[in-house]
Amino acid sequence: MKALKIVVTGPFNAGKTEFIRTISEVEVVSTERKITNPLMAVKEETTVAMDFGRVTLDDRLLHLFGTPGQPRFDFMWEVLSKEMQGFIVLADSTTPESFVEVERMLKLFQQYAAAPYIVAANKQDLEGALPPEEVQKALKVDKVLPCVATDKASVEKVLLELIEAIG
């Protein structure tokens, strides 16, 4: 069985690490470090290089690579995108101010590889989350899937849609 390389990206605090942790069948390899910038302290740790998890869905082995979200670690984005077969861009639907960064990342990852992608509006379970239709309109993309990165069925649905797009 040939593995598919899937990159999970999005801005800081969009839920990339949690997305991978929720679905991975193996212990996630993570490069989380304590946040040193007090302005970014909405959580205790942040990814500085990558997260890696693995899952088998629909008889396909998926290698999931999560990118760091902070622009200061953006040198890893292109590295992790090498030979990817698809990617997921997570948008934090509770922070529309991050959508500018989502748009920038989407354009960059499309330049890295002509690969199928999914945009997912994460944190749909939280109060104040914009519905996927509003996120879609704000990002000017064809489709946005709802997502809750802490819910295995939700993460699986996003991944299965990407697998279908990859073919």
Image: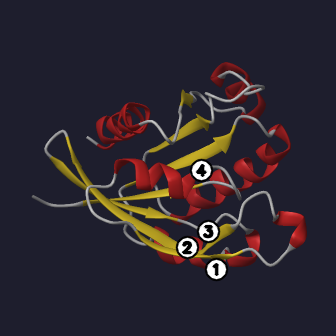
Is the residue marked by circle 4 packed among few (<14), some (14-19), or many (20+) residues within 10 Å?
Answer: many
Amino acid identity at mark 3: Pro
The span from disc 2 to disc 4 (Cα, nearest Å) is 20 Å
SS at circle 4:
loop
Q: Which residue is mark 1?
A: 75
Q: Please, what secondary structure does the residue beneath circle 1 have?
A: helix
- For label 1, count other residues whose C-alpha is less than 10 Å away and answer few (under 14), some (14-19) or many (20+): few
Looking at the rendered structure, the secondary structure element under dot 3 is loop
Residue 115 seen in this snapshot: no
Residues at discs 1 and 4 in contact (Cβ within 8 Å)? no
Q: Are marks 1 and 2 in contact (CB under 8 Å)?
A: yes
The secondary element bearing badge 2 is classed as: helix
The location of residue 36, given as percent across then percent down, is: 80, 79
Res. 15 mark: 4
> Which amino acid, by three-letter code, is at mark 4?
Gly
Q: Which residue is mark 3?
A: 68
* Horizontal relation, residue 105 to residue 7: left or right: right
Q: CA distance from mark 1 to mark 2?
A: 6 Å
- Residue 76 placement (x, y as % from top left): 58, 77
Q: In front: mark 2 or mark 3?
A: 3
Earlier residue among tags 1 and 4: 4
Residue designated by label 2: 78
Image point (53%, 33%), residue name = 147
User: Which of the two residues, 118 or 22, is positioned nearer the viewer here?
Assistant: 22
Q: Which three-letter amino acid code belongs to the residue tagged 2?
A: Glu
